[in-house]
Amino acid sequence: MSLRLQSEDGARVPESMATQNKPLVLVVEDEAALATMLRYNLEKQGFRVEEAGDGQEALTRIAESQPDLVLLDWMLPVLSGIEVCRQIRRRSLTRDLPVIMVTARTEDQDAVRGLNTGADDYITKPFNMEALLARMRALLRRSNVVPAKGRLTFHDIVMDLATHRVQRGTRSLHLGPTEFRLLEFFMQHPRRVFTREELLDAVWGPDIHVEPRTVDVHIRRLRKAINEEGELDVVRTVRAAGYALDTQPI
Protein backbone atom coordinates (compact mmCIF):
# COMPACT_ATOMS: atom_id res chain seq x y z
CA MET A 1 0.00 0.00 0.00
CA SER A 2 1.47 3.36 -1.03
CA LEU A 3 1.38 6.30 1.35
CA ARG A 4 -0.50 9.34 0.08
CA LEU A 5 1.17 12.56 1.16
CA GLN A 6 -0.87 15.76 1.25
CA SER A 7 -0.06 19.40 1.77
CA GLU A 8 -1.97 21.61 4.20
CA ASP A 9 -4.46 22.58 1.49
CA GLY A 10 -5.23 18.93 0.70
CA ALA A 11 -3.22 18.67 -2.53
CA ARG A 12 -1.17 15.55 -3.00
CA VAL A 13 2.55 16.07 -2.51
CA PRO A 14 4.89 14.13 -4.85
CA GLU A 15 6.91 11.59 -2.86
CA SER A 16 10.13 12.90 -4.42
CA MET A 17 9.35 16.39 -3.06
CA ALA A 18 8.54 15.00 0.38
CA THR A 19 11.84 13.15 0.40
CA GLN A 20 13.75 16.30 -0.54
CA ASN A 21 12.17 18.10 2.42
CA LYS A 22 13.65 15.60 4.87
CA PRO A 23 16.90 16.77 6.53
CA LEU A 24 20.01 15.25 4.97
CA VAL A 25 22.54 13.84 7.44
CA LEU A 26 26.07 12.85 6.42
CA VAL A 27 27.37 10.01 8.60
CA VAL A 28 31.17 9.99 8.54
CA GLU A 29 32.15 6.68 10.14
CA ASP A 30 34.68 4.00 9.18
CA GLU A 31 33.09 1.25 11.31
CA ALA A 32 30.66 -0.37 8.88
CA ALA A 33 28.42 -1.88 11.58
CA LEU A 34 28.00 1.47 13.36
CA ALA A 35 27.37 3.30 10.08
CA THR A 36 24.68 0.75 9.18
CA MET A 37 23.05 1.11 12.61
CA LEU A 38 23.03 4.89 12.34
CA ARG A 39 21.56 4.81 8.84
CA TYR A 40 18.77 2.43 9.94
CA ASN A 41 17.82 4.49 12.98
CA LEU A 42 18.07 7.88 11.27
CA GLU A 43 16.01 6.83 8.26
CA LYS A 44 13.44 5.37 10.65
CA GLN A 45 13.18 8.83 12.24
CA GLY A 46 12.61 10.56 8.90
CA PHE A 47 16.12 11.65 7.90
CA ARG A 48 17.85 11.15 4.59
CA VAL A 49 21.31 9.65 5.08
CA GLU A 50 24.55 9.65 3.13
CA GLU A 51 27.71 7.91 4.29
CA ALA A 52 31.43 8.52 4.04
CA GLY A 53 34.08 6.09 5.27
CA ASP A 54 37.02 8.47 5.58
CA GLY A 55 37.75 12.16 6.00
CA GLN A 56 38.58 12.91 2.37
CA GLU A 57 35.40 11.22 1.12
CA ALA A 58 33.45 13.28 3.67
CA LEU A 59 34.77 16.57 2.26
CA THR A 60 33.97 15.41 -1.28
CA ARG A 61 30.39 14.49 -0.36
CA ILE A 62 29.88 17.79 1.48
CA ALA A 63 31.05 19.69 -1.61
CA GLU A 64 28.79 17.67 -3.93
CA SER A 65 25.56 17.83 -1.89
CA GLN A 66 25.79 19.91 1.24
CA PRO A 67 24.03 18.10 4.09
CA ASP A 68 21.96 19.72 6.81
CA LEU A 69 24.08 18.13 9.53
CA VAL A 70 27.26 16.06 9.82
CA LEU A 71 27.85 13.23 12.30
CA LEU A 72 31.64 13.15 12.30
CA ASP A 73 33.75 10.41 13.85
CA TRP A 74 36.94 11.64 15.51
CA MET A 75 39.20 8.74 14.41
CA LEU A 76 39.07 8.39 10.62
CA PRO A 77 41.39 7.12 7.88
CA VAL A 78 43.08 9.56 5.46
CA LEU A 79 41.93 12.71 7.32
CA SER A 80 40.95 12.83 10.99
CA GLY A 81 37.60 14.16 12.09
CA ILE A 82 39.38 17.11 13.69
CA GLU A 83 40.97 18.06 10.35
CA VAL A 84 37.68 17.56 8.48
CA CYS A 85 35.98 19.90 10.96
CA ARG A 86 38.73 22.50 10.51
CA GLN A 87 38.30 22.43 6.73
CA ILE A 88 34.50 22.67 7.03
CA ARG A 89 34.87 25.84 9.12
CA ARG A 90 37.47 27.37 6.76
CA ARG A 91 35.17 27.22 3.72
CA SER A 92 32.64 30.01 3.32
CA LEU A 93 29.89 27.70 2.03
CA THR A 94 30.15 25.30 4.97
CA ARG A 95 31.33 27.43 7.90
CA ASP A 96 27.80 27.35 9.41
CA LEU A 97 27.18 23.64 8.76
CA PRO A 98 26.12 21.92 12.03
CA VAL A 99 28.68 19.30 13.11
CA ILE A 100 28.38 16.75 15.92
CA MET A 101 31.64 15.01 16.76
CA VAL A 102 31.29 11.32 17.62
CA THR A 103 34.22 10.10 19.67
CA ALA A 104 35.42 7.21 21.80
CA ARG A 105 37.52 9.70 23.77
CA THR A 106 36.12 10.49 27.19
CA GLU A 107 38.65 13.01 28.51
CA ASP A 108 37.26 16.52 29.03
CA GLN A 109 40.22 18.12 27.23
CA ASP A 110 39.50 16.03 24.13
CA ALA A 111 35.89 17.23 24.09
CA VAL A 112 37.02 20.84 24.49
CA ARG A 113 39.54 20.36 21.67
CA GLY A 114 36.76 19.14 19.38
CA LEU A 115 34.59 22.14 20.24
CA ASN A 116 37.50 24.54 19.76
CA THR A 117 38.06 23.07 16.30
CA GLY A 118 34.53 24.09 15.35
CA ALA A 119 32.21 21.24 16.31
CA ASP A 120 28.82 22.40 17.58
CA ASP A 121 28.42 19.43 19.91
CA TYR A 122 29.96 16.07 20.72
CA ILE A 123 28.81 12.67 21.95
CA THR A 124 30.94 9.80 23.24
CA LYS A 125 30.75 6.15 22.24
CA PRO A 126 28.85 4.09 23.19
CA PHE A 127 25.92 6.47 23.02
CA ASN A 128 22.16 6.29 23.47
CA MET A 129 20.36 6.81 20.15
CA GLU A 130 17.64 8.93 21.75
CA ALA A 131 20.27 11.25 23.23
CA LEU A 132 21.93 11.61 19.81
CA LEU A 133 18.59 12.32 18.12
CA ALA A 134 17.75 14.97 20.71
CA ARG A 135 21.07 16.75 20.06
CA MET A 136 20.61 16.53 16.29
CA ARG A 137 17.09 17.97 16.44
CA ALA A 138 18.20 20.79 18.73
CA LEU A 139 20.97 21.76 16.29
CA LEU A 140 18.67 21.54 13.27
CA ARG A 141 16.08 23.73 15.00
CA ARG A 142 18.71 26.39 15.64
CA SER A 143 20.19 26.27 12.14
CA ASN A 144 17.18 25.73 9.89
CA VAL A 145 14.19 27.52 11.43
CA VAL A 146 13.80 31.07 10.18
CA PRO A 147 12.61 33.25 13.07
CA ALA A 148 9.82 35.78 12.78
CA LYS A 149 10.70 38.93 10.88
CA GLY A 150 12.40 41.56 12.92
CA ARG A 151 15.73 43.03 13.95
CA LEU A 152 17.67 43.09 17.16
CA THR A 153 20.18 45.83 17.85
CA PHE A 154 22.73 46.36 20.58
CA HIS A 155 25.55 48.92 20.50
CA ASP A 156 26.83 48.68 16.89
CA ILE A 157 25.57 45.11 16.27
CA VAL A 158 22.45 44.49 14.16
CA MET A 159 20.87 41.03 13.86
CA ASP A 160 18.31 40.53 11.09
CA LEU A 161 16.13 37.60 12.15
CA ALA A 162 14.41 37.28 8.76
CA THR A 163 17.60 36.89 6.74
CA HIS A 164 19.70 35.30 9.51
CA ARG A 165 22.42 37.93 8.99
CA VAL A 166 24.46 39.83 11.55
CA GLN A 167 26.45 43.02 11.06
CA ARG A 168 28.73 45.02 13.29
CA GLY A 169 29.00 48.49 11.86
CA THR A 170 29.61 47.90 8.15
CA ARG A 171 31.17 44.47 8.71
CA SER A 172 29.27 41.21 8.15
CA LEU A 173 29.71 38.67 10.94
CA HIS A 174 29.94 34.95 10.25
CA LEU A 175 28.50 32.93 13.12
CA GLY A 176 27.97 29.22 13.54
CA PRO A 177 24.45 28.08 14.47
CA THR A 178 25.21 27.86 18.19
CA GLU A 179 26.95 31.24 18.28
CA PHE A 180 24.04 32.81 16.37
CA ARG A 181 21.52 31.47 18.89
CA LEU A 182 23.73 32.53 21.79
CA LEU A 183 24.06 36.08 20.46
CA GLU A 184 20.32 36.21 19.69
CA PHE A 185 19.52 35.24 23.28
CA PHE A 186 21.92 37.85 24.66
CA MET A 187 20.47 40.55 22.39
CA GLN A 188 16.97 39.67 23.52
CA HIS A 189 18.11 40.21 27.14
CA PRO A 190 20.83 42.89 27.07
CA ARG A 191 22.82 43.70 30.21
CA ARG A 192 21.33 40.82 32.16
CA VAL A 193 23.82 38.34 33.65
CA PHE A 194 23.16 34.66 32.91
CA THR A 195 24.80 31.69 34.57
CA ARG A 196 26.22 28.89 32.44
CA GLU A 197 23.30 26.67 33.46
CA GLU A 198 20.76 29.31 32.37
CA LEU A 199 22.50 29.67 29.01
CA LEU A 200 22.54 25.90 28.55
CA ASP A 201 18.77 25.72 29.14
CA ALA A 202 18.02 28.69 26.87
CA VAL A 203 20.37 27.92 23.96
CA TRP A 204 20.90 24.16 24.04
CA GLY A 205 17.56 23.22 25.62
CA PRO A 206 16.65 21.72 28.99
CA ASP A 207 16.59 18.14 27.65
CA ILE A 208 20.12 18.24 26.23
CA HIS A 209 22.96 17.17 28.52
CA VAL A 210 25.96 19.41 27.83
CA GLU A 211 28.82 20.16 30.20
CA PRO A 212 28.81 23.75 31.57
CA ARG A 213 32.34 24.29 30.23
CA THR A 214 30.85 23.96 26.74
CA VAL A 215 29.37 27.43 27.27
CA ASP A 216 32.87 28.86 27.81
CA VAL A 217 34.05 27.37 24.51
CA HIS A 218 31.18 28.91 22.56
CA ILE A 219 31.56 32.26 24.32
CA ARG A 220 35.20 32.34 23.15
CA ARG A 221 34.08 31.52 19.62
CA LEU A 222 31.39 34.22 19.76
CA ARG A 223 33.91 36.81 20.94
CA LYS A 224 36.32 35.85 18.16
CA ALA A 225 33.56 36.19 15.57
CA ILE A 226 32.18 39.56 16.66
CA ASN A 227 35.31 41.38 17.84
CA GLU A 228 38.11 42.84 15.77
CA GLU A 229 41.16 44.66 17.09
CA GLY A 230 40.17 48.00 18.57
CA GLU A 231 36.48 47.12 18.94
CA LEU A 232 34.75 47.02 22.30
CA ASP A 233 34.20 43.50 23.62
CA VAL A 234 30.48 43.57 24.41
CA VAL A 235 30.41 40.09 25.95
CA ARG A 236 31.15 40.66 29.62
CA THR A 237 32.41 37.94 31.94
CA VAL A 238 31.10 38.33 35.47
CA ARG A 239 33.33 36.44 37.87
CA ALA A 240 31.57 33.61 39.73
CA ALA A 241 28.29 34.55 38.05
CA GLY A 242 28.29 34.10 34.27
CA TYR A 243 28.07 36.26 31.15
CA ALA A 244 26.18 39.31 29.90
CA LEU A 245 25.90 41.42 26.77
CA ASP A 246 27.01 44.80 28.11
CA THR A 247 29.05 47.82 27.12
CA GLN A 248 29.90 48.76 30.69
CA PRO A 249 32.85 47.26 32.58
CA ILE A 250 32.33 45.50 35.90
Image: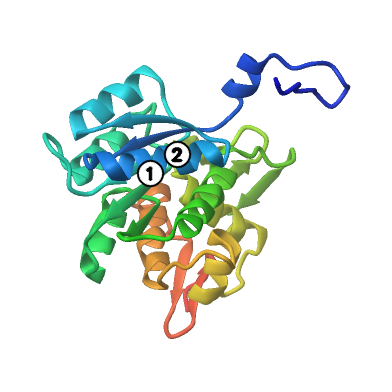
Q: Residue at x 37, y 60 (%)?
A: 127
Residue under label 1: 37
Note whether residue 174 is visible.
no
Q: Residue at x 27, y 62 (%)?
A: 111
Q: Residues within 10 Å of mark 1 (few under 14, many from 20)?
A: few
Q: Quick check: 167 left or right of 217?
A: right
The reply to whether discs 2 and 1 touch (Cβ–Cβ < 8 Å) is yes
The front one of 8 and 5 is: 5
Q: Give the amino acid type for the residue marked by disc 2 in the picture.
A: Tyr
Residue, far left: 78
Residue 132 point in image, percent of width and height: 45, 54
Secondary structure under badge 2? helix
Q: Quick check: 14 left or right of 131?
A: right
Q: Residue at x 40, y 20 (%)?
A: 65
Above/below status of 245 relative to 224: below
Residue, far right: 9
Q: Point out which mark residue 40 bears.
A: 2
Residue 180 point in image, percent of width and height: 52, 48
The front one of 55 and 232 is: 55
Residue 105 point in image, percent of width and height: 21, 62
CA gap, disc 2 and disc 1:
5 Å
Note whether residue 209 is visible.
yes
The front one of 126 and 74 is: 126
Secondary structure under badge 1? helix
